[in-house]
Image (tube, rainbow, N blue to C red):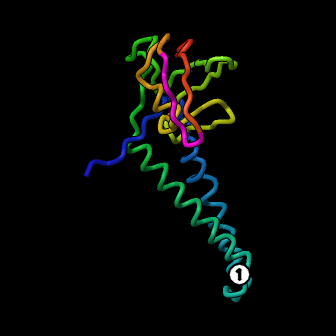
Amino acid sequence: MAEKRYPMTAEGKQNLEQELEDLKLKKRPEIIERIKIARSFGDLSENSEYSSAKDEQSVVESRISEIKTMLQYADVVDVNDVDSNEVSVGKSVTFQEEGEEPETYKIVGSAESDPDQGKISNDSPIAKSLVGKKVGDEVMIETPAASFQVKIIKVEN
């Protein structure tokens, strides 16, 4: 069975590498030190500091593992390899639904999506509908909440 690939921008990959380094070099040692200190308090069965540190250690180790997998199977998208008018991961797309204000989103890999910052995952219904389309195309976007027709106005690197 093929491994899942993780499309991402070069910036997204760099951010994941930085997060991994921070978790391994700063967060992990801090938690290990907290566990050591908590152990010195005695009975571990009723030691909330120890339980809390162990829980946090579990979360951090899971995140480290997750990031390592994403980086191992990363597909860094070079927007210069795609037609300048074509929507793809790593590009910003502006589209407009009739009678509505234009909306602009940057399409990124799922690891770097942040809707509050205008970055949507390539796995989202909106991005799936837009990827591969070009400026001027009319596109039907189907989301769990609704379906709507939009026109792609602009695509930028």
Please indicate, yes or no, whether residue 13 appears anywhere in the rendered image. Answer: no
Residue 157: image location, x then y, percent: 52, 16
Residue at 55% x, 43% y is 144
How many dots with numbers?
A: 1
Residue identifier under label 1: 40
Q: Residues within 10 Å of mark 1 (few under 14, many from 20)?
A: few
Residue at 46% x, 29% y is 129
Q: Secondary structure at mark 1?
A: loop
Residue 122: image location, x then y, percent: 48, 34
Inspect the image, locate mark 1, and give the three-letter code of the amino acid beneath it: Ser
From the image, give the main secondary structure of the stretch colored magenta: strand
Q: Nearer the viewer, residue 151 or 27?
A: 151
The answer to whether residue 67 is magenta is: no
Residue 155: image location, x then y, percent: 53, 14
Residue 48: image location, x then y, percent: 73, 78
Q: Residue furthest left?
A: 1
Q: Nearer the viewer, residue 99 or 129?
A: 99
Residue at 49% x, 30% y is 9
Q: As displayed, is residue 49 above or below residue 134?
A: below
Q: As displayed, is residue 26 above or below residue 45?
A: above
Please indicate, yes or no, whether residue 97 appears anywhere in the rendered image. Answer: yes
Q: As displayed, is residue 122 above or below residue 131?
A: below
| Side of 117 where 73 appears, left or right | left
Q: Which residues are magenta?
A: 138-145
Q: Nearer the viewer, residue 88 or 71?
A: 88
Residue at 67% x, 32% y is 117
